[in-house]
Amino acid sequence: MNPPGAAPHLLDFDRFDRRAFEGVAAAAGLDRLGAQGDRLLPGFPALIEDTFYAFYKGDARLRPVEALPPSARVPHRLLARVMDAPRFGETRDRAMLDPVAAARAARAVGERLLRLVRRDDLLLDREVLDAHRMRAAEQALTEVQARRAALEAMVDEAAADGADPGPDRLKRRMLEVELDTEIELRQQALDGAERRAAQMADELPRDLMRRLTRAVDALPRDLMALDAEVEQFGRELGGGARLDARQRLALGDRLARSEKLRKLAALVGAFRRMARRERRRKTPRRGPEVYAVERGRDVGRLLAGELAALRHPLLRRDVRRRFVEGALLQYGLRGDDDRGRGPMVICLDGSGSMRGPRELWSKAVTLTLADRARRQGRACRAIVFDAGPEPFARELVPPRPPGGARRLPDSEAVVEFAEHFPGGGTDFVPPLEAALATLGESRYRRGDIVFVTDGEAQVPPAFEARFAAEKARLGFRVVGVLVDVGRARGETLARLADEVHRVSELTGDAAMQVMGSIR
Protein backbone atom coordinates (compact mmCIF):
# COMPACT_ATOMS: atom_id res chain seq x y z
CA MET A 1 0.00 0.00 0.00
CA ASN A 2 1.32 3.44 -0.94
CA PRO A 3 1.20 6.40 1.45
CA PRO A 4 -1.13 9.23 0.32
CA GLY A 5 0.59 11.31 -2.36
CA ALA A 6 3.42 8.81 -2.83
CA ALA A 7 4.31 7.41 -6.23
CA PRO A 8 2.62 4.05 -6.83
CA HIS A 9 4.64 0.86 -6.65
CA LEU A 10 4.62 -1.42 -9.66
CA LEU A 11 4.77 -4.75 -7.82
CA ASP A 12 3.82 -6.13 -4.42
CA PHE A 13 6.23 -6.56 -1.51
CA ASP A 14 6.01 -7.19 2.21
CA ARG A 15 7.59 -5.58 5.23
CA PHE A 16 10.53 -8.01 5.19
CA ASP A 17 11.34 -6.99 1.62
CA ARG A 18 11.03 -3.36 2.65
CA ARG A 19 13.39 -3.89 5.58
CA ALA A 20 15.97 -5.46 3.26
CA PHE A 21 15.74 -2.46 0.92
CA GLU A 22 16.07 0.06 3.73
CA GLY A 23 19.15 -1.77 5.00
CA VAL A 24 21.12 -1.14 1.80
CA ALA A 25 19.41 1.81 0.07
CA ALA A 26 21.61 4.53 1.54
CA ALA A 27 24.88 2.56 1.35
CA ALA A 28 24.22 1.58 -2.28
CA GLY A 29 23.27 5.12 -3.26
CA LEU A 30 19.73 4.11 -4.28
CA ASP A 31 18.16 6.95 -2.28
CA ARG A 32 20.40 9.51 -3.93
CA LEU A 33 19.85 7.98 -7.36
CA GLY A 34 16.08 8.07 -6.91
CA ALA A 35 16.13 11.71 -5.86
CA GLN A 36 18.20 12.66 -8.91
CA GLY A 37 15.86 10.85 -11.29
CA ASP A 38 12.65 12.14 -9.70
CA ARG A 39 13.34 15.61 -11.10
CA LEU A 40 13.37 14.17 -14.62
CA LEU A 41 10.89 11.29 -14.45
CA PRO A 42 8.10 11.36 -11.84
CA GLY A 43 8.01 8.19 -9.77
CA PHE A 44 11.70 7.40 -10.34
CA PRO A 45 12.40 6.61 -6.63
CA ALA A 46 9.58 4.06 -6.61
CA LEU A 47 10.90 2.62 -9.90
CA ILE A 48 14.35 2.12 -8.32
CA GLU A 49 12.83 0.46 -5.26
CA ASP A 50 10.66 -1.80 -7.40
CA THR A 51 13.69 -2.75 -9.50
CA PHE A 52 15.40 -3.84 -6.28
CA TYR A 53 12.38 -6.02 -5.39
CA ALA A 54 12.32 -7.48 -8.90
CA PHE A 55 15.85 -8.84 -8.37
CA TYR A 56 15.49 -9.59 -4.65
CA LYS A 57 12.17 -11.48 -4.67
CA GLY A 58 11.93 -14.89 -6.23
CA ASP A 59 8.30 -14.44 -7.32
CA ALA A 60 8.08 -10.75 -8.22
CA ARG A 61 5.15 -9.97 -10.52
CA LEU A 62 4.14 -6.66 -12.02
CA ARG A 63 0.76 -5.23 -11.14
CA PRO A 64 -1.72 -4.90 -14.01
CA VAL A 65 -1.16 -1.59 -15.74
CA GLU A 66 -4.90 -0.89 -15.60
CA ALA A 67 -4.72 -0.78 -11.80
CA LEU A 68 -2.09 2.00 -11.84
CA PRO A 69 -2.49 5.76 -12.30
CA PRO A 70 -1.45 7.38 -15.60
CA SER A 71 1.92 8.63 -14.34
CA ALA A 72 3.00 5.02 -13.67
CA ARG A 73 2.56 3.91 -17.31
CA VAL A 74 6.12 4.77 -18.43
CA PRO A 75 7.86 3.31 -15.31
CA HIS A 76 5.71 0.19 -15.70
CA ARG A 77 6.80 -0.21 -19.32
CA LEU A 78 10.47 0.24 -18.37
CA LEU A 79 10.39 -2.28 -15.51
CA ALA A 80 8.50 -4.75 -17.71
CA ARG A 81 11.30 -4.43 -20.27
CA VAL A 82 13.89 -5.09 -17.56
CA MET A 83 12.07 -8.21 -16.36
CA ASP A 84 11.59 -9.45 -19.94
CA ALA A 85 15.32 -9.32 -20.72
CA PRO A 86 16.71 -12.76 -21.69
CA ARG A 87 19.23 -12.88 -18.82
CA PHE A 88 17.09 -11.20 -16.16
CA GLY A 89 16.34 -14.58 -14.58
CA GLU A 90 20.05 -15.36 -14.30
CA THR A 91 20.69 -12.12 -12.46
CA ARG A 92 17.67 -12.66 -10.21
CA ASP A 93 18.95 -16.15 -9.30
CA ARG A 94 22.25 -14.59 -8.16
CA ALA A 95 20.60 -11.70 -6.31
CA MET A 96 17.58 -13.48 -4.81
CA LEU A 97 17.46 -12.84 -1.05
CA ASP A 98 20.88 -11.16 -1.28
CA PRO A 99 20.24 -7.44 -0.63
CA VAL A 100 23.76 -6.44 -1.66
CA ALA A 101 23.57 -8.11 -5.08
CA ALA A 102 20.00 -6.87 -5.62
CA ALA A 103 21.06 -3.32 -4.73
CA ARG A 104 23.98 -3.45 -7.17
CA ALA A 105 21.72 -4.70 -9.95
CA ALA A 106 19.06 -2.06 -9.22
CA ARG A 107 21.68 0.67 -9.16
CA ALA A 108 23.16 -0.46 -12.50
CA VAL A 109 19.72 -0.37 -14.13
CA GLY A 110 18.84 2.96 -12.48
CA GLU A 111 22.09 4.61 -13.57
CA ARG A 112 21.50 3.50 -17.17
CA LEU A 113 17.94 4.89 -17.10
CA LEU A 114 19.14 8.15 -15.57
CA ARG A 115 21.71 8.61 -18.34
CA LEU A 116 19.03 8.01 -20.96
CA VAL A 117 16.68 10.51 -19.35
CA ARG A 118 19.36 13.18 -19.07
CA ARG A 119 20.26 12.83 -22.75
CA ASP A 120 16.57 13.27 -23.74
CA ASP A 121 16.62 9.77 -25.22
CA LEU A 122 13.82 8.52 -23.02
CA LEU A 123 11.27 11.36 -23.14
CA LEU A 124 11.04 14.67 -24.93
CA ASP A 125 10.94 17.86 -22.88
CA ARG A 126 7.20 18.28 -23.41
CA GLU A 127 6.62 14.65 -22.42
CA VAL A 128 8.59 15.16 -19.19
CA LEU A 129 6.48 18.24 -18.47
CA ASP A 130 3.29 16.28 -19.15
CA ALA A 131 4.47 13.53 -16.80
CA HIS A 132 5.04 16.04 -13.99
CA ARG A 133 1.59 17.56 -14.59
CA MET A 134 -0.01 14.14 -14.45
CA ARG A 135 1.74 13.36 -11.18
CA ALA A 136 0.67 16.70 -9.70
CA ALA A 137 -2.92 16.08 -10.79
CA GLU A 138 -2.89 12.63 -9.21
CA GLN A 139 -1.59 14.02 -5.95
CA ALA A 140 -4.24 16.75 -5.96
CA LEU A 141 -6.98 14.18 -6.60
CA THR A 142 -5.66 12.00 -3.77
CA GLU A 143 -5.75 14.97 -1.39
CA VAL A 144 -9.34 15.87 -2.32
CA GLN A 145 -10.45 12.25 -1.92
CA ALA A 146 -8.79 12.17 1.49
CA ARG A 147 -10.71 15.31 2.54
CA ARG A 148 -13.99 13.80 1.30
CA ALA A 149 -13.32 10.58 3.23
CA ALA A 150 -12.52 12.57 6.38
CA LEU A 151 -15.81 14.48 6.03
CA GLU A 152 -17.76 11.23 5.71
CA ALA A 153 -16.02 9.81 8.76
CA MET A 154 -16.92 12.91 10.76
CA VAL A 155 -20.59 12.62 9.74
CA ASP A 156 -20.70 8.92 10.63
CA GLU A 157 -19.08 9.60 14.01
CA ALA A 158 -21.60 12.35 14.79
CA ALA A 159 -24.50 10.05 13.82
CA ALA A 160 -23.15 7.25 16.00
CA ASP A 161 -22.98 9.62 18.97
CA GLY A 162 -26.58 10.77 18.36
CA ALA A 163 -25.54 14.40 18.03
CA ASP A 164 -28.00 16.84 16.42
CA PRO A 165 -26.44 18.15 13.19
CA GLY A 166 -28.46 21.35 13.65
CA PRO A 167 -27.47 24.38 11.60
CA ASP A 168 -24.23 22.72 10.34
CA ARG A 169 -26.18 20.30 8.12
CA LEU A 170 -26.54 22.74 5.23
CA LYS A 171 -22.93 23.88 5.44
CA ARG A 172 -21.75 20.26 5.48
CA ARG A 173 -23.94 19.38 2.48
CA MET A 174 -22.53 22.30 0.52
CA LEU A 175 -18.99 21.14 1.31
CA GLU A 176 -19.82 17.61 0.14
CA VAL A 177 -21.15 18.90 -3.17
CA GLU A 178 -18.08 21.07 -3.61
CA LEU A 179 -15.69 18.18 -2.95
CA ASP A 180 -17.65 15.78 -5.21
CA THR A 181 -17.56 18.32 -8.03
CA GLU A 182 -13.82 18.85 -7.63
CA ILE A 183 -13.22 15.08 -7.60
CA GLU A 184 -15.27 14.67 -10.77
CA LEU A 185 -13.40 17.45 -12.60
CA ARG A 186 -9.98 16.16 -11.59
CA GLN A 187 -10.94 12.62 -12.54
CA GLN A 188 -12.03 13.80 -15.99
CA ALA A 189 -8.70 15.56 -16.44
CA LEU A 190 -6.87 12.37 -15.48
CA ASP A 191 -8.94 10.34 -17.95
CA GLY A 192 -7.49 12.43 -20.75
CA ALA A 193 -4.03 12.18 -19.18
CA GLU A 194 -4.30 8.40 -19.15
CA ARG A 195 -4.59 8.35 -22.93
CA ARG A 196 -1.52 10.57 -23.25
CA ALA A 197 0.42 8.38 -20.78
CA ALA A 198 -0.46 5.21 -22.71
CA GLN A 199 0.71 6.89 -25.91
CA MET A 200 3.99 7.97 -24.25
CA ALA A 201 4.64 4.42 -22.98
CA ASP A 202 3.87 2.89 -26.37
CA GLU A 203 6.13 5.34 -28.21
CA LEU A 204 9.26 4.85 -26.15
CA PRO A 205 12.18 4.59 -28.62
CA ARG A 206 12.90 1.02 -29.64
CA ASP A 207 16.63 1.69 -29.69
CA LEU A 208 16.44 2.82 -26.06
CA MET A 209 14.61 -0.34 -25.08
CA ARG A 210 17.24 -2.46 -26.81
CA ARG A 211 20.01 -0.63 -24.92
CA LEU A 212 18.16 -1.21 -21.67
CA THR A 213 17.90 -4.91 -22.48
CA ARG A 214 21.62 -5.10 -23.23
CA ALA A 215 22.39 -3.43 -19.90
CA VAL A 216 20.29 -6.01 -18.04
CA ASP A 217 21.88 -8.88 -19.98
CA ALA A 218 25.36 -7.65 -18.96
CA LEU A 219 24.50 -7.74 -15.26
CA PRO A 220 25.34 -11.44 -14.58
CA ARG A 221 28.85 -10.98 -15.96
CA ASP A 222 29.42 -7.68 -14.15
CA LEU A 223 28.04 -8.90 -10.83
CA MET A 224 30.06 -12.10 -11.02
CA ALA A 225 33.27 -10.18 -11.71
CA LEU A 226 32.63 -7.71 -8.88
CA ASP A 227 31.71 -10.48 -6.42
CA ALA A 228 34.93 -12.30 -7.31
CA GLU A 229 36.98 -9.15 -6.72
CA VAL A 230 35.30 -8.47 -3.36
CA GLU A 231 35.83 -12.09 -2.33
CA GLN A 232 39.47 -11.98 -3.42
CA PHE A 233 40.05 -8.75 -1.54
CA GLY A 234 38.44 -10.15 1.61
CA ARG A 235 40.49 -13.33 1.31
CA GLU A 236 43.84 -11.84 0.34
CA LEU A 237 43.85 -8.40 1.99
CA GLY A 238 41.12 -8.69 4.59
CA GLY A 239 42.28 -11.93 6.20
CA GLY A 240 38.92 -13.60 5.63
CA ALA A 241 37.03 -11.25 7.95
CA ARG A 242 33.27 -11.26 7.40
CA LEU A 243 31.81 -8.06 5.96
CA ASP A 244 28.30 -6.80 6.54
CA ALA A 245 26.09 -5.52 3.71
CA ARG A 246 27.24 -1.91 3.96
CA GLN A 247 30.91 -2.91 4.01
CA ARG A 248 30.45 -5.19 0.98
CA LEU A 249 28.76 -2.39 -0.96
CA ALA A 250 31.40 0.17 -0.02
CA LEU A 251 34.22 -2.25 -0.85
CA GLY A 252 32.63 -3.15 -4.18
CA ASP A 253 32.38 0.53 -5.10
CA ARG A 254 36.02 1.13 -4.25
CA LEU A 255 37.20 -1.89 -6.19
CA ALA A 256 35.14 -0.84 -9.20
CA ARG A 257 36.82 2.58 -9.16
CA SER A 258 40.38 1.59 -8.21
CA GLU A 259 42.53 -0.51 -10.50
CA LYS A 260 45.34 -0.20 -7.95
CA LEU A 261 43.29 -2.04 -5.32
CA ARG A 262 42.53 -4.87 -7.72
CA LYS A 263 46.19 -5.23 -8.73
CA LEU A 264 47.29 -5.08 -5.10
CA ALA A 265 44.88 -7.83 -4.07
CA ALA A 266 46.20 -10.08 -6.85
CA LEU A 267 49.83 -9.36 -5.89
CA VAL A 268 49.21 -10.01 -2.20
CA GLY A 269 47.53 -13.28 -3.14
CA ALA A 270 50.60 -14.36 -5.10
CA PHE A 271 52.96 -13.39 -2.26
CA ARG A 272 50.83 -15.23 0.31
CA ARG A 273 50.89 -18.39 -1.77
CA MET A 274 54.68 -18.13 -2.06
CA ALA A 275 54.96 -17.57 1.69
CA ARG A 276 52.83 -20.65 2.39
CA ARG A 277 55.10 -22.75 0.18
CA GLU A 278 58.12 -21.46 2.09
CA ARG A 279 56.51 -22.36 5.42
CA ARG A 280 55.93 -25.93 4.23
CA ARG A 281 59.67 -26.41 3.85
CA LYS A 282 60.39 -27.52 7.37
CA THR A 283 63.85 -26.19 8.07
CA PRO A 284 65.23 -27.52 11.38
CA ARG A 285 65.82 -24.71 13.84
CA ARG A 286 67.77 -25.04 17.07
CA GLY A 287 66.11 -23.55 20.10
CA PRO A 288 67.85 -21.20 22.51
CA GLU A 289 70.38 -22.78 24.90
CA VAL A 290 71.71 -21.81 28.32
CA TYR A 291 75.33 -20.74 28.07
CA ALA A 292 76.05 -18.52 31.12
CA VAL A 293 74.75 -16.90 34.27
CA GLU A 294 74.17 -13.17 34.02
CA ARG A 295 72.48 -10.34 35.85
CA GLY A 296 69.03 -9.02 34.87
CA ARG A 297 65.36 -9.11 35.85
CA ASP A 298 63.73 -11.61 33.51
CA VAL A 299 61.53 -13.55 35.96
CA GLY A 300 61.28 -16.51 33.60
CA ARG A 301 65.07 -17.06 33.67
CA LEU A 302 65.86 -16.44 37.36
CA LEU A 303 68.03 -18.96 39.21
CA ALA A 304 66.27 -21.19 41.74
CA GLY A 305 68.12 -19.55 44.65
CA GLU A 306 66.74 -16.12 43.75
CA LEU A 307 63.19 -17.53 43.61
CA ALA A 308 63.66 -19.27 46.97
CA ALA A 309 64.80 -16.01 48.56
CA LEU A 310 61.36 -14.54 47.87
CA ARG A 311 59.98 -16.73 50.65
CA HIS A 312 62.45 -15.39 53.25
CA PRO A 313 61.05 -12.40 55.20
CA LEU A 314 64.37 -10.50 55.14
CA LEU A 315 65.88 -11.60 51.82
CA ARG A 316 62.65 -10.74 50.02
CA ARG A 317 63.42 -7.01 50.32
CA ASP A 318 66.89 -7.52 48.87
CA VAL A 319 65.41 -9.45 45.92
CA ARG A 320 62.98 -6.63 45.24
CA ARG A 321 65.78 -4.05 45.34
CA ARG A 322 67.96 -6.02 42.94
CA PHE A 323 64.94 -6.61 40.65
CA VAL A 324 64.51 -2.84 40.31
CA GLU A 325 68.24 -2.48 39.63
CA GLY A 326 68.27 -5.38 37.16
CA ALA A 327 70.91 -7.18 39.22
CA LEU A 328 69.25 -10.57 39.86
CA LEU A 329 71.08 -13.72 38.83
CA GLN A 330 69.49 -15.35 35.77
CA TYR A 331 70.39 -17.82 33.05
CA GLY A 332 71.88 -16.35 29.91
CA LEU A 333 70.47 -17.74 26.65
CA ARG A 334 71.80 -17.68 23.14
CA GLY A 335 69.89 -18.34 19.97
CA ASP A 336 67.52 -15.97 18.19
CA ASP A 337 64.29 -17.98 18.25
CA ASP A 338 62.84 -15.58 20.77
CA ARG A 339 62.99 -12.64 18.38
CA GLY A 340 60.26 -11.34 16.19
CA ARG A 341 57.24 -12.71 18.01
CA GLY A 342 56.13 -9.31 19.26
CA PRO A 343 54.11 -6.63 17.49
CA MET A 344 55.27 -5.23 14.16
CA VAL A 345 55.48 -1.58 13.07
CA ILE A 346 56.03 -1.12 9.33
CA CYS A 347 57.16 2.30 8.09
CA LEU A 348 56.50 2.62 4.37
CA ASP A 349 57.92 5.36 2.15
CA GLY A 350 55.12 7.17 0.29
CA SER A 351 57.25 9.76 -1.49
CA GLY A 352 56.72 10.57 -5.16
CA SER A 353 59.58 8.33 -6.31
CA MET A 354 57.75 5.26 -4.95
CA ARG A 355 54.78 5.75 -7.27
CA GLY A 356 53.86 2.84 -9.53
CA PRO A 357 55.36 -0.68 -9.27
CA ARG A 358 57.42 0.16 -6.17
CA GLU A 359 54.34 1.26 -4.28
CA LEU A 360 52.43 -1.90 -5.23
CA TRP A 361 55.36 -4.18 -4.40
CA SER A 362 56.09 -2.59 -1.02
CA LYS A 363 52.41 -2.50 -0.02
CA ALA A 364 52.02 -6.13 -1.07
CA VAL A 365 54.99 -7.04 1.15
CA THR A 366 53.47 -5.01 4.00
CA LEU A 367 50.06 -6.68 3.72
CA THR A 368 51.63 -10.14 3.47
CA LEU A 369 53.59 -9.40 6.66
CA ALA A 370 50.35 -8.21 8.26
CA ASP A 371 48.71 -11.50 7.31
CA ARG A 372 51.58 -13.41 8.91
CA ALA A 373 51.27 -11.26 12.03
CA ARG A 374 47.56 -12.06 12.21
CA ARG A 375 48.23 -15.79 11.94
CA GLN A 376 50.88 -15.60 14.68
CA GLY A 377 48.71 -13.54 17.02
CA ARG A 378 50.77 -10.37 16.66
CA ALA A 379 49.62 -6.78 16.20
CA CYS A 380 50.70 -4.83 13.13
CA ARG A 381 50.60 -1.09 12.49
CA ALA A 382 51.52 0.52 9.16
CA ILE A 383 52.91 4.07 8.92
CA VAL A 384 53.02 5.71 5.46
CA PHE A 385 55.25 8.77 5.29
CA ASP A 386 56.69 11.41 3.00
CA ALA A 387 58.16 14.78 4.00
CA GLY A 388 55.01 15.85 5.86
CA PRO A 389 55.05 16.31 9.64
CA GLU A 390 52.13 13.91 10.30
CA PRO A 391 52.56 10.39 8.89
CA PHE A 392 49.51 8.32 7.97
CA ALA A 393 49.08 5.43 10.44
CA ARG A 394 46.61 2.53 10.45
CA GLU A 395 46.40 -0.65 12.53
CA LEU A 396 46.25 -3.43 9.95
CA VAL A 397 46.00 -6.04 12.72
CA PRO A 398 44.70 -4.55 15.99
CA PRO A 399 46.29 -5.61 19.27
CA ARG A 400 44.66 -8.48 21.11
CA PRO A 401 41.65 -7.16 23.04
CA PRO A 402 41.10 -7.96 26.72
CA GLY A 403 40.27 -11.60 27.21
CA GLY A 404 42.62 -12.88 24.54
CA ALA A 405 40.10 -13.06 21.69
CA ARG A 406 41.37 -13.79 18.18
CA ARG A 407 42.55 -10.73 16.26
CA LEU A 408 40.67 -9.88 13.07
CA PRO A 409 42.01 -7.49 10.45
CA ASP A 410 40.33 -4.11 10.09
CA SER A 411 39.09 -4.16 6.49
CA GLU A 412 38.46 -0.42 6.41
CA ALA A 413 41.97 0.28 7.68
CA VAL A 414 43.43 -2.08 5.07
CA VAL A 415 41.57 -0.30 2.24
CA GLU A 416 42.61 3.13 3.52
CA PHE A 417 46.22 2.00 3.76
CA ALA A 418 46.14 0.50 0.27
CA GLU A 419 44.69 3.66 -1.29
CA HIS A 420 46.76 6.24 0.60
CA PHE A 421 49.75 7.66 -1.23
CA PRO A 422 50.95 11.16 -0.22
CA GLY A 423 53.57 11.45 -3.01
CA GLY A 424 55.72 14.20 -1.44
CA GLY A 425 59.40 14.30 -0.45
CA THR A 426 61.26 12.07 2.02
CA ASP A 427 61.84 12.63 5.73
CA PHE A 428 62.75 9.76 8.06
CA VAL A 429 62.28 11.56 11.38
CA PRO A 430 58.42 11.81 11.58
CA PRO A 431 57.77 8.11 10.88
CA LEU A 432 60.50 7.00 13.28
CA GLU A 433 59.07 9.31 15.95
CA ALA A 434 55.66 7.75 15.35
CA ALA A 435 57.19 4.26 15.51
CA LEU A 436 58.90 5.06 18.82
CA ALA A 437 55.62 6.35 20.23
CA THR A 438 53.91 3.13 19.09
CA LEU A 439 56.54 0.86 20.63
CA GLY A 440 56.27 2.86 23.85
CA GLU A 441 52.64 1.78 24.19
CA SER A 442 52.03 -1.24 26.38
CA ARG A 443 50.12 -2.96 23.55
CA TYR A 444 53.18 -2.79 21.27
CA ARG A 445 55.88 -3.62 23.82
CA ARG A 446 58.74 -5.77 22.51
CA GLY A 447 57.82 -5.00 18.93
CA ASP A 448 60.11 -4.46 15.95
CA ILE A 449 60.29 -1.91 13.12
CA VAL A 450 60.39 -2.66 9.40
CA PHE A 451 61.46 0.40 7.42
CA VAL A 452 60.86 0.36 3.64
CA THR A 453 62.21 3.19 1.46
CA ASP A 454 63.82 3.89 -1.89
CA GLY A 455 65.61 7.07 -0.95
CA GLU A 456 67.99 8.89 1.33
CA ALA A 457 67.18 11.52 3.95
CA GLN A 458 69.25 13.54 6.40
CA VAL A 459 68.65 12.70 10.06
CA PRO A 460 70.01 15.06 12.77
CA PRO A 461 72.75 13.49 14.90
CA ALA A 462 70.81 14.33 18.05
CA PHE A 463 67.85 12.30 16.81
CA GLU A 464 70.10 9.38 15.83
CA ALA A 465 71.54 9.33 19.36
CA ARG A 466 68.11 9.46 20.97
CA PHE A 467 66.80 6.77 18.61
CA ALA A 468 69.71 4.47 19.52
CA ALA A 469 69.09 5.05 23.22
CA GLU A 470 65.39 4.26 22.85
CA LYS A 471 66.21 1.14 20.84
CA ALA A 472 68.44 -0.09 23.66
CA ARG A 473 65.86 0.78 26.31
CA LEU A 474 62.84 -0.78 24.56
CA GLY A 475 64.79 -3.69 23.10
CA PHE A 476 63.46 -3.58 19.54
CA ARG A 477 65.14 -4.28 16.20
CA VAL A 478 64.99 -2.35 12.94
CA VAL A 479 64.98 -4.18 9.61
CA GLY A 480 65.57 -1.85 6.66
CA VAL A 481 64.43 -2.56 3.09
CA LEU A 482 66.08 -0.39 0.43
CA VAL A 483 64.10 -0.58 -2.81
CA ASP A 484 65.77 -0.03 -6.21
CA VAL A 485 69.41 0.30 -5.26
CA GLY A 486 70.27 1.74 -8.66
CA ARG A 487 69.69 5.25 -7.38
CA ALA A 488 69.59 4.88 -3.59
CA ARG A 489 72.65 4.93 -1.34
CA GLY A 490 71.18 4.07 2.03
CA GLU A 491 73.88 5.36 4.39
CA THR A 492 71.31 6.80 6.81
CA LEU A 493 69.21 3.65 6.79
CA ALA A 494 72.33 1.56 7.44
CA ARG A 495 73.09 3.62 10.56
CA LEU A 496 69.53 3.31 11.90
CA ALA A 497 68.80 -0.35 11.11
CA ASP A 498 70.22 -3.56 12.51
CA GLU A 499 70.20 -5.07 9.03
CA VAL A 500 69.40 -3.69 5.57
CA HIS A 501 68.12 -5.68 2.59
CA ARG A 502 68.78 -4.15 -0.81
CA VAL A 503 66.14 -4.99 -3.40
CA SER A 504 67.10 -4.42 -7.04
CA GLU A 505 64.14 -6.26 -8.65
CA LEU A 506 60.50 -6.05 -7.59
CA THR A 507 59.84 -9.78 -7.78
CA GLY A 508 58.22 -12.40 -5.61
CA ASP A 509 61.61 -13.93 -4.81
CA ALA A 510 62.84 -10.57 -3.52
CA ALA A 511 59.71 -10.27 -1.39
CA MET A 512 60.33 -13.73 0.08
CA GLN A 513 63.92 -12.81 0.92
CA VAL A 514 62.77 -9.70 2.76
CA MET A 515 59.99 -11.50 4.62
CA GLY A 516 62.30 -14.39 5.45
CA SER A 517 64.52 -12.04 7.44
CA ILE A 518 61.61 -10.77 9.55
CA ARG A 519 60.62 -13.31 12.17
Image (cartoon, rainbow, N blue to C red):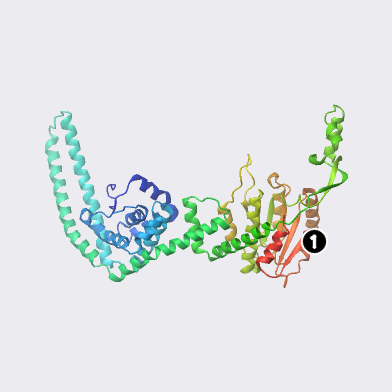
Residue pictured at 65% horizontal, 60% vertical: 277
Q: Which of 248 and 195 is in front in this view?
A: 248
In this view, the residue farthest toward the top is 313
In this view, the residue farthest toward the bottom is 486
**Helix, strand or loop at disc 1?**
helix
Kindly indicate the quadrant of the structure image that contains residue 491: bottom right
Kindly indicate the quadrant of the structure image that contains residue 149: top left
Kindly indicate the quadrant of the structure image that contains residue 301: top right
Q: What residue type is labelled 1?
A: Arg
Q: Nearer the viewer, residue 425 or 407?
A: 407
Q: In this view, does 305 lie to the left or right of 266?
A: right
Q: Is residue 243 left or right of residue 438?
A: left
* Residue 62, visible in the rendered structure: yes
Q: In this view, does 337 lie above or below 353?
A: above
| Percent of width and height locating residue 233 | 54, 58
Residue pictured at 87% horizontal, 28% vertical: 314
* Residue 457, visible in the rendered structure: no
| Percent of width and height locating residue 134 | 23, 58
Residue pictured at 77% horizontal, 48% vertical: 474
Q: Is residue 177 above or below residue 419?
A: above
| Percent of width and height locating residue 271 | 63, 62
> Mark 1 = which residue?
495
| Percent of width and height locating residue 106 | 38, 58
Task: Specify the quadrant that holds the C terminus.
Answer: bottom right
Q: Is residue 376 left or right of residue 305?
A: left
Q: Residues within 10 Å of mark 1 (few under 14, many from 20)?
A: few
User: What count of labels does the image hold?
Assistant: 1
Residue pictured at 18% horizontal, 29% vertical: 161
